[in-house]
Image (tube, grey):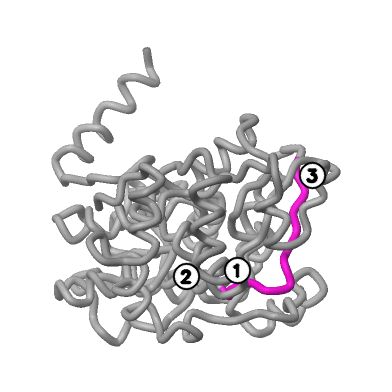
Amino acid sequence: MRRIVLALPVLVALVATGCGGASDSKEATAAGSGGGKQQLSLVAYSTPEVVYDEVIPKFQQTEPGSGATFKTSYGASGDQSRAVEAGQKADVVTFSLEPDLDRLVKAGLVDKSAEDRWVSTSVVSFIVRKGNPKHIKTWDDLVKPGVQVVTPNPFSSGAAKWNLMAAVGAKGLPYVRTLLTQHVKVQPKSGREALQTFTSGTGDVLISYENEAVTAQKKGQSVDYVIPGQTIKIENPIAVTAKAPETAKAFVDYALSKPAQEVFASWGYRPVNKEVLAANASKFPTPSGLFTIDKFGGWSKVNDQYFDPENGAIAKIEDDAGVSTAK
């Protein structure tokens, strides 16, 4: 009964702010804060929840974060971005990919100077069952007879867009058609839901972030992972909103600092702090065929060419596969 009562204020707050795609929301209060000097709203994509569960308390122990409280919301990256655009309260936002931040820049909710500021990076990888019984090593292995693949829906999940552009860059668009129409049986809403779907027993391989594989292993899931030779570098932006208080800016600075970046690295995110990245060089080898979204002309061109609901090449493939392309 106590759990239900505690959940009601959060539910009411989410409804009141029109949170849309938020899949999880909670509050973190600084120990001994006496009620808190400043409450910050962090709106994030689904996967780094485990990181911020550690980073927020560490920030609260610093002088800039002393007395701060947090209300956090996690969900599919695109849904979270659209929710903030529609009015959900946010002081700090962090998304799976740059276009979800650009949406808020265009809406005047985030200053343009926040563009190209990454809090973490990763690479697209293959999460497989323990021991890799299907012997998945390359993109070609994903389309062998009998192999079933899980990847999120690219029209709600930023992770899915990274996954599919990695496939396009490695093998081309015809390969993606074969993959989506013949081997992908389910497309969950977010990267985190996709991991949960896979670890519950669905599919032979999950296309996902490298950090999701590490997270699954740290949580005791019986999985292994493979980083293909050809894959894409994932870049995750972070920003404060235009009207955010100074404490929010201090939090973003802390998220980029060595102590916070060490937490990111511990959960499998490739840190952007050079010192932390150098210390974890053996943990994060560079794939031989690593490429970036610039290979395709950047996200603006990619979204128009591949993910436009009416004319995008991947949108048409998803339509043929019976997958919703509604945003």
Q: Is residue 201 above or below residue 33?
A: above
For the point 30% across and 87% down, the residue is 113
Q: Kindly identify the amino acid type of the residue bearing the numbered disc 1.
A: Ser
Magenta span has 120?
no
Q: Amino acid at mark 3?
A: Lys
Q: CA distance from mark 3 to mark 1?
A: 24 Å
Q: Main secondary structure of the magenta part?
A: strand
Q: Please, which residue is most extreme toward the top here?
A: 1
Residue at left 75%, top 59%? 226
| Up/down of 208 relative to 186, above or below | below
Looking at the rendered structure, the secondary structure element under dot 1 is strand
Q: Residue furthest right?
A: 131
Q: CA distance from mark 2 to mark 3?
A: 31 Å
Q: Which residues are magenta?
A: 223-233
Whether the magenta-drawn stretch holds residue 225 is answered as yes
Res. 236 mark: 2
Q: Amino acid at mark 2?
A: Asn
Ranked by sequence position, the earlier of labels 2 and 3 is 3
Which residue matches tag 1?
122
State whether residue 87 is above or below residue 186. below
Residue under circle 3?
134
User: Where does the image place residue 112, in percent across and percent down from the top left?
Assistant: 25, 84
Question: Would you say the residues marked 2 and 1 are in contact, meaning their CB atoms lie under 8 Å apart?
Answer: yes
* Residue 91 visible to the viewer: yes
Q: Identify the residue at horizontal 32%, vertical 57% (top origin).
A: 78
Residue in front for this viewpoint, 85 or 309:
309
Identify the secondary structure beneath mark 2. Answer: strand
Q: Tag 1 or tag 2, which sits nearer the N-term?
A: 1
Q: Is residue 32 left or right of residue 209?
A: left
Q: Nearer the viewer, mark 3 or mark 1?
A: 3
